[in-house]
Image (tube, grey):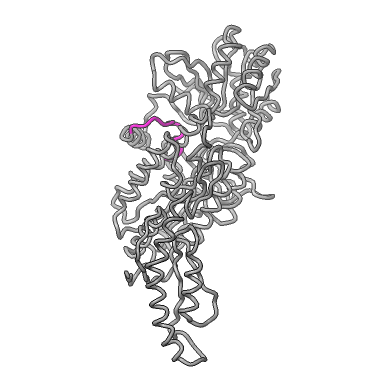
Amino acid sequence: MVALRNADPGTMGRRFMELLDEVRVRGQRGPLLLVASTSEPPAGHRFDPPATGELEPVRQYRAWRAAIHRAEPSPYLVIRLTEAGASRSDDPARLLLARPLAFWAVVLALLVVPVMATVTATAGCGAELREVDGQCVGLGALGKIAPHPLVAPVARRIEEQNAAIPLGHKVFTVAYLGPLTTQPGAQFKDGQMTAVAGELAGIGAYQKSYNTSRSDWKMKIVFANTGQDFISAELAATGIAERAREDSSLAAAVGFAWSREEVKRAVGVLTRANVPMVSTVTTVGDIAEVGDRRSAFLFRLAVVNSLQMRATVHWLETLGLAEGVDRKPEVAVVWQRQDGELYSQDLKELFLEEYPGQSADFSFGDDASLGVAMREACGSGAEVIYYTGRADFLSSLRRDWGASCEQREIRLLASDDVTGSVAKDVRSNPAAHDVSMSFVSLTDVRDTSLTNQSQQTLRRWIAESGVGVSFAHAAFGFDAAQAVAIAFSAYRTQSEADDILSGVHYNLRGQAFDGATGKVSFSEHATDHDAQGREVWLMTVESGRPIQATWVCRPTATAAECASPSE
């Protein structure tokens, strides 16, 4: 038996309980009874006995023992004491008999139950996660989630940084919501996993920078796996919401990179739980809508599609996409049709509504239908192909463009989702790559663009990790973690950090800082929390040449506001 006299949040006692719980979640158990005194019950799964107004140890123990006959870590038994103690109307002698019975019951349970429970708890996804499409999804231990090979090295390094937090230090927790896994046998998902690895690299880089400072508070990262394509985003968000109710150290959730119906529902779950969210690159305006109003808890770093489209149309109509391409050319939009997918269709609809030139659209749902759509688009008389699909199909897109469009001198333009994959392909083989296209970017991805401390810190962490990630997504991950940390630090100067969620939410409003993606500034408005004055870049790359920035814009509701990058 181990007795902890003080296990309040932020103490060494609470940290010991958290470490013990992490060990138990991984399936390791032993005959140990932990008794702790705390003013706030622990964050892990626990058993709350019915509020009868009486202390009946035998009944409470029996109920607790029944509760642990499941494939989960044994729950904590919470007994709330008052200064006056328990009031009983029956014979106290019965309580004297109950004490030895409870004691021997505990002894038997410690000898028998852990041995039996260990066999069941180590199977499948464990207690906290749920198996969906062959993946362990939800908020839980990284070992059970088993991240994709492209994601695992970065995620493990973050786990090592979590483990390096010294005992006794106070922590605030940031939950990452994103797809850490793919379905067994899934194809064309390396782009998605590279982007996730990038976001986590940014978060890990900022965590290391923050935790090596002299602050007595440290940042801890936990993982909420949505599964491939964010299909289980709502389930992962539910796990974060439950954690928020039990863990006072939770500060915010970050990630939410894709614009899908599932992500929209996840935003609703966390909005109702009053959990602040910092989204990296979700860009569809409707993602922020919960019911008939806008979520006051979602803060977005990226330029939304409506503003991105204002810049894109201006390039085509007025500035010129590239040498040899007429102003206001005929455009064929190739967009991705998929259940739950909002991003591609939203950009297509915005373009057809706003572009004054001649245009048509061609949809696809998989690799084979993309080839058909590209042949039809290139045979339609279009001078520009505008691709609004996901980076998952980038290699197929380039192949089909080369087969059907290149000889006709039709220019390829892609929306921002491909940025990370294009930059990674070019950077991995600078002098011999075969990428030729124009693309929209939400940050400057030129190799010469490392202009501030945040970018240099990020680049150094990625180099130390020795893994290939999307630097564009890493920059957004870095800034998401930084936004939460700055809000938390501001809150600490205002109070004793006894309501971290509310404090971080309040201090995200009106926040401004120089980040890895450039200048970040959130409005003080009660609900409109898209970053203000963000840049949209028109990038161009030719085979064997570095990426060039053609135009940079700071679009508003009324104007594109574009200029040469050198101005």
488 versus 339 height, above or below: below
71 and 225: which one is in front? 71
Residue 475 visible in the displayed image: no
Say which residue appears at 49% left-offset and 47% top-offset.
224
- The residue lying toward the viewer, choosing from 546 and 225, is 225
Where residue 359 appears, as percent x and y from the top left, is 70, 19
Magenta residue check for 467: yes
Give the prevailing secondary structure in the magenta stretch. Answer: helix
Tell me, yes or no, whether the highlighted magenta stretch contains residue 90: no
Tell me what residue is drawn at x 44 percent, y 68 percent: 40
Q: Which corner quadrant holds the N terminus?
A: bottom left
Res 149 → quadrant: top left
Q: Is residue 48 left or right of residue 307?
A: left
Closer-to-camera residue (514/471): 471
Q: Give above or below for 17 relative to 5.
A: above
Residue 17 screen position, x and y as percent: 37, 62
Residue 201 % position (x, y): 40, 38
Q: How many marks?
A: 0
Residue 133 rendering spot, x and y as whole percentages: 56, 41
Q: Is residue 6 visible?
A: yes
Q: Is residue 168 above or below residue 385?
A: below
Above or below for 252 versus 316: below
Question: Which residue corresponds to the image point at 63% horizontal and 48% vertical from the top-left?
Answer: 294
Q: Magenta span covers which residues?
A: 466-478
Location of residue 7 (image quadrant): bottom left
